[in-house]
Image (cartoon, coloured by chain):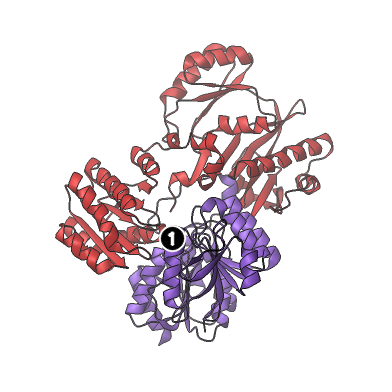
Chain colours: A purple, B red
Amino acid sequence: MGILVSKDTRVIVQGITGRLGALQTKMMLEYGTKIVAGVTPGKGGGTIFGIPIYDSVEEALSEHEAEASILYVPAPFVKEAAFEAIEAGIKFMVIITDWVPVHDALEIKALANEKGTLYIGPNTPGITIPGEIKLGMIHTVTPGNIGVVSRSGTLTAEVTNLLTSAGLGQSAVLGLGGDPVVGLRLKDVLKLFEEDEHTKAIVIIGEIGGTMEEEAAEYIEKYVSKPVVAFIAGKSAPPEKKMGHAGAIITGGRGTAESKINALKEAGVKVAETPWEVPTLVKECLK
Amino acid sequence: MRAGGARMRLYEYEAKAILKKFGIAVPQGRLAHNTREVREAFVEINRPVALKAQILAGGRGKAGGIRFARDVDEAEKEATQLFGTPIRGFKVDKILVEERLNIARELYLGVTIDREKGSPIMIASSEGGIEIEEVAAKSPEKIATLHPNILRGVREYEVRKLIKRIGLGGDALSEATRIAWRLYQIFRAYDAELVEINPLVVTAEGKIVAADARMSVDDHALFRHPELEALRLERFEDPLEREGQVRGVNFVNLKGNIAIMGNGAGLVMALLDAVKIAGGQPACFLDTGGGLSVDRVERSLDLLLMKADSDPDVKAIFFAFWFMISPAEEVTKGFLNVLAKRKPKIPMVGVIQGVGAERAVEILNNAGIKCYPTIREGINAVLELIR
């Protein structure tokens, strides 16, 4: 069950010897994630928690089969690491690192599109299929049939934890990444949840900025038959100090909390005022 | 929410220096910091000038931030007024003195990021000099766009096609194409989020000149641009927001009665919303950022207490942390270190959840910080305090 990854997915960790990479690798292994190799240039030949380390993704893949890669590489090196994974044939990437330059994110997106690689991030907490696999740091989960997709990190933990506490388990929980340019977008994940037979209802955790929620609302109206509940953060945020006019032309005035909430409501989505309303609304939908 | 620092904006004179470096014509001009320098600039240019307040806000013209002068005394008079009047809330301490152009036609050129498509976008319009979103709303047919392939770069013929679509031909087509192509090179070279020329003026003499320019740079890429990094901090007018930048903490100053801190922008935004719905007013947005360490907690809490101490409207402090990786108890030391040096004068309520939360709550409760296991309970408690 789940989307994008499963208990059988084999994973390499890029940046496995860094502080965060090592700490997270240990926690992922404890969860049961099948990590087959790690990559840190210059540390090839060693091991960490019994996992062999290689100097490059290519070398790792010549010794092991893997479908997915998770990146804990420092921001200045993320572009090269992602390029390496994409060109070595990795099918799914999780880019945990934050502070990645947006031009690098644009280049990663272009190459991934060219090669057909799917990814989430940068600046994502990862994806967890409860009871099967954890790629990243989302841990407040329990198996069930609610699909959770978010643009945030700690707010994902909060909402998922509220669902878990209310007895509402999850089919998958994932963060898309908090950056302006990310891999999978909300509507892409809605499609996956709609097709996933284990998912009975969908929870969206959105926030101000960009137009992913508006785009998702259009998609829901046309293609999503399952009930959707949303929470949008940033209703009380003062308008962002304006960046300039060329940015506004693309969004055409969209991107505020109000515009997102209205678009979602018009598409039949139940929108929660606070995070703790989410479980109540989900239960109403499932009645 | 991103603080102002997430995009470093450049002043018009800085953006124009970059355009010039890349071979794009800009009006003859000089930056002045006082009326004496304005007089000197006029003498040097020696023909009618525009005096342009250098502020990091749009709508400057409408707010009276652009004046004109035909002689040196008029220039001094207008400059005196400009230096003395805040424009859009910004104090004017720099004026760009520029030759006045004989405008035959005003166009628009811009390069920015199309988030939806995940691609750069070049925008051209046959109507410049007014806000481009107005053009987009009223006459979208006057706007042409192009999504260059970022991996191979933009081709000149693609740009020529774009410029042709806004109605240019002959020499003007070639010159505007050259300028737009160079604008894209600037966008890439500087990790810009936006670089725009508005208006791009065709003069009565047939020259094409960037009359006004706006540019902002992705601050996540400033490690590649040390010359800009050095200028970054002075962009923050608010002393506490500037201090946040120094400390690597995302801080936005607001007016309200509850100072709010948390880890993660989405979470903190949700806290602000919930406090407001419950009847409180958020006094600030403080996102510590990820990878919570003792040091990071110290830098953040200390800044929050600075806010509480300096703003008499703030009646209570509220924080909520989610520990997804490192155990919460490890960073409680950060709280204790700050509190040993700086005692808050107003009540503080917190919420700690995630890895190691129970132990952390116990430690903080013993230190006199009332902590709750859920955000809902924490918010109820802090609102009780200000009632």
Q: Position of residue B245 (x, y in %)?
A: 40, 43
Q: Where is residue A167 shown, x and y percent of the image?
A: 35, 83
Residue for point 71% across, 52% down: B148
Q: Is residue A252 visible?
A: no
- Residue drawn at point x = 54 percent, y = 58 percent: A43
Image x and y of residue B184, in percent: 68, 43
- Rendering quarter of residue A30: bottom left
Q: Quadrant of residue B387?
A: bottom left
In-front residue for pair B221/B90: B221
Which residue is at the front of the view, B335 or A285? B335
* Residue furthest out toward the front: A45
- Tell which residue pokes out farthest to the right in this image: B170
Is B385 positioned to the left or the right of A210 in the image?
left
- Chain letter for the residue marked with disc 1 in the picture: A
Q: Quadrant of the C terminus of chain A?
A: bottom left
Residue A41 seen in this snapshot: yes
Is A181 placed above or below A142 here? Answer: above
Q: Nearer the viewer, residue A192 or A276?
A: A192
- Residue A174, horizontal then vertical, whole percent: 48, 71
The residue carrying pointer 1 sits among few (fewer than 14), some (14 to 19) or many (20 or more) residues within 10 Å by Cα, namely some
For disc 1, the marked residue is: A20
